[in-house]
Amino acid sequence: MICIKNGTLHTAVTRETFVADILIDNGKIVTIGKHISSENAEVIDATGLHVYPGFIDAHCHTGLDGYGIGYEGQDYNELNDPVTPQVQAIDGLNPFDPCMNMAAKAGVTCFATGPGSSNSIGGTFAAIKPVGTRIDNMIVKFPIAMKCAFGENPKRCYQNQGISSRMTTASKIREALHTAKLYKAKKEAAGDDISKLPSYDQKSEALIPVLNRQIPLKAHAHQANDIFTAIRIAKEFGVGLTLEHVTEGHMIANELAKEKFPLAVGPTFGHATKFELQNKTWETPGILAKAGCHVSIITDAPVIPLHHLPLCAGFAIKAGMDEFDALRAVTINPAEHIGIADRVGSLEEGKDADIVIVDGNPFDVTGVIRHVLIDGKKVE
């Protein structure tokens, strides 16, 4: 057991902070309250310190795009086929990627990682924690979403393999979903009669959980027109959807507020390296949050190093985002975005003991992280 004593708690559930203790047992938050008995528990004195839930990134490629290495360690895009729903993040993730420990020490205790955005459909994402030596034991939830991409990337990467416009990218996604829908219907019609089953189709099989709304499409879309194309296709097929990057979201905030789809905004730090990033601004997450949207802030690591996620929230605050909204955008909102809020994302009894203890403000460059706990164990 561990007892965190006298810390100022930022729960990500209530705007008000308060001084309290947290008792941790068997990797879970057991009790939050005043003057909790610390008998038989290791005590962490958090007097004068600030206690936060672990930070969460709803969208990155850490573990698939290796640190400081070239092609040999890069496994985040399958470039032989523009439509690859059958590939799985967990089959390429490297738990020994140094970015894992760098993120953990910075208080990023959970993140969603998976294929990049070269493919119209790229494969399944996983939610993992950055501690361990075997991915199977690091998974919080898998699969969490099916990656798809709109905009520049697919047409740039596959301009000599069948895609040269946004229209074709959208058509390939529709084609794959239609094919999977027919495949699913044939399987259901066959019932227990194996002789009537359609020939095995790995791609269609992988898309059945999307059609069944077990996992959403995770749609890479920067420009406003691409965002609306993603929404249009999701509605056509009646599937779930989360919107990723949303660079021009501030230009269509009222429309996105009506749609109610979860939005993951970023990566915002850095130069506008593509045409579709020309309207990039740190004001986007704040404008969307004020409009009533469900907003997460993301690094898209390694575009922004994953360990800089808290500073991304700080830049958003500097650009006008409410600080509580920014806190939620790197804790409970991304947990909800990727479907794991029952376990992580806030300081609440019964949740995983993923906790960050900070001297100062973690969203400021002067904030110093004193302790990070993941599943109730100190990160070294």
Image (tube, grey):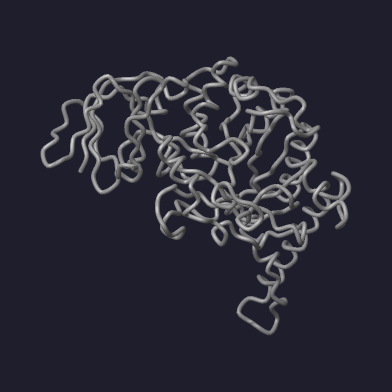
- Left or right: residue 288 versus residue 8 is right
Quadrant where the image shows the N terminus: top left
* Image location (x, y in percent) of residue 145: 60, 50
**Vertical side of 225 occupied by 364: above or below:** above
**Residue under the point 64% across and 82% down:** 193
**Vertical side of 59 occupied by 186: above or below:** below
**Residue under the point 30% across and 38% down:** 349
* Image location (x, y in percent) of residue 322: 52, 17
Quadrant where the image shows the C terminus: top left
Between 40 and 257, the one lying in front of the other is 40
Examine the image and state in which quarter residue 283 appears.
top right
- Left or right: residue 337 versus residue 15 is right
* Image location (x, y in percent) of residue 146: 64, 52
* Image location (x, y in percent) of residue 113: 56, 48
Q: Residue furthest left?
A: 39
Examine the image and state in which quarter residue 183 appears.
bottom right
